[in-house]
Amino acid sequence: MIPEALKAKWFWYSVCCVLCWGGWALVSKLGTNEISAAGMQFIFAFGFIPVAFVALALKRLEFERSLKGIAYSLGNGILAGIGGLALFAAYRSGGNTSVITVATALYPVITVMLAFLILRERLTWLQIVGLGFAVLAMVIFAL
């Protein structure tokens, strides 16, 4: 019998995300060997344009009316832009790509802490232990 997770849309979207982001990290490192972090960040933004057009073609564009949602979306873009610039600079600095990628891939730890503090989401004891192991793994990996 197939586990329920393998039947869920979220699982396959997550697999697609992991595959794309894995390729994205590799292409980011290769790009920063050739151009500056600022150049990477500027040109990186243009990569979203074809994706946006495909998304528009698949669904009719509905203009958003929620100012709060729009503000969150803009904040998302600003934080992603600054984070991307920092990542490209880290790759360009000559650091080990695998260590930089693992270290920056721990951003969910921050997300989980913020979700706990701001959204009042609860964590099980086992999930807290898992977070601890994730951080410990990054420290060991960096050594």
Image (cartoon, rainbow, N blue to C red):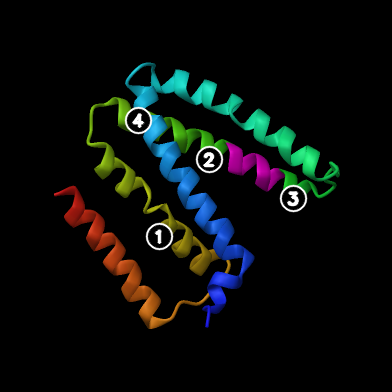
What secondary structure is found at the residue carrying circle 4?
Answer: helix
Front residue of this view, candidates 23 and 68: 23
Decide: is 45 above or below 14: above
Q: Which mark is residue 99?
A: none
Q: Counting other residues with Cα less than 10 Å from the Cα at mark 4, is it few (<14), some (14-19), or many (20 or more)? A: many
Dot 4 and dot 1 residues touching (CB under 8 Å): no
* 64 left or right, relative to 47: right
The residue shown at (39%, 16%) is 35
Residue type at numbered disc 1: Val
x and y percentages locating residue 6 in the rendered image: 54, 70
Looking at the rendered structure, the kind of residue marked 4 is Lys
Marks 3 and 4 sit apart, C-alpha to C-alpha, by 35 Å
Residue beneath disc 1: 109
Element assignment for label 2: helix
Q: Which residue is situated farthest in the front direction here?
A: 1
Nearer the N terminus, badge 4 or badge 1? 4
Answer with mark 1 or mark 2, whichever residue precedes in sequence.
Answer: 2
Dot 3 or dot 2: first in sequence order is: 3
Tell me: residue 10, above or below residue 24.
Answer: below
Closer to viewer: mark 1 or mark 3 = 1
